[in-house]
């Protein structure tokens, strides 16, 4: 199966971001670039060790559920809605390899969480000086 960048953008990335309620052109561009150059961005793992389009590791996948989505039940429910009914329960990491929408959502969450973490010291400093 051959997938073009336009197809990935129009049929996977944009609908997934809209479903999550976070679509912007910049978000869409970032995820398309991440799919093309995942390891070079430093957020995702090397092509040989990660799973799926964005090369997300098993550890990253579990961590996003245990340390991020566990505290955001509404968002967790939306992301879980992208996963297959039965396959997710028996092999959650398999969803990263076979479900482009789910994989895209997890990639976005990893990126979003890294941005929030990077901004926290700046926000704390700004609050302390205010």
Image (cartoon, rainbow, N blue to C red):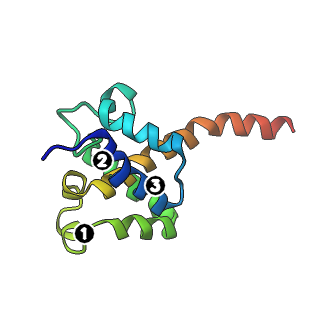
Of mark 1 and mark 2, the one earlier in the sequence is: 2
Q: Position of residue 4 (x, y in %)?
A: 25, 41
5 to the left or right of 29: left
Residue 96 in percent (x, y) is at: 25, 53
Residue at label 2? 7
- Is residue 8 positioned above or below 41 on the image? below
Quadrant assignment, res 93:
bottom left
Mark in the foreground, 1 or 3: 3
Query: Could you tell me which residue is drawn at 39 percent across and 58 percent down?
Result: 65
Name of the residue lying farthest toward the right: 130
Residue located farthest toward the top when viewing the structure as drawn:
40
Which residue corresponds to mark 1? 84
The answer to whether marks 1 and 3 mark residues whose Cβ atoms lie closer than 8 Å is no
Q: Position of residue 128 (x, y in %)?
A: 81, 38
Q: Position of residue 10 (x, y in %)?
A: 37, 50
The quadrant where residue 129 appears: top right
User: Counting other residues with Cα less than 10 Å from the Cα at mark 2, is it few (<14), some (14-19), or many (20 or more)?
Assistant: few
Q: CA distance from mark 3 to mark 2?
A: 15 Å
**Please, is residue 66 above or below residue 54 in the view?**
below
**Mark 3 vs 2, N-terminal side:** 2
SS of the residue under disc 1: loop
Q: Relative to 62, is 125 on the left or the right?
A: right
Taking depth in this image into account, of 61 and 37 the one nearest to the observer is 37
Q: Is residue 117 visible?
A: yes
Gap between marks 1 and 3, in whole Å?
18 Å
Q: Which mark is residue 34?
A: none
Q: Nearer the viewer, mark 1 or mark 2?
A: 2
Residue matched to label 3: 17
Q: Nearer the viewer, residue 36 or 121?
A: 36
Mark 3 or 2: the one toward you: 2
């Amino acid at each position: 199966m051959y997938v073009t960048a336009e197809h990935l953008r129009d049929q996977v990335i944009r609908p997934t971001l809209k479903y999550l309620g976070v679509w912007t052109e910049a978000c869409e561009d970032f995820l398309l670039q991440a799919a093309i150059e995942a390891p070079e961005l430093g957020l995702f793992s090397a092509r040989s060790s990660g799973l799926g389009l964005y090369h997300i590791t098993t550890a990253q996948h579990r961590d996003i559920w245990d340390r991020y989505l566990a505290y955001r039940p509404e968002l967790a429910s939306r992301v879980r809605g992208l996963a297959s009914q039965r396959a997710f329960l028996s092999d959650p990491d398999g969803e990263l390899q076979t479900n482009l929408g789910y994989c895209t959502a997890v990639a976005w969450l990893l990126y979003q969480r890294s941005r929030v973490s990077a901004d926290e010291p700046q926000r704390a400093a700004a609050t302390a000086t205010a």
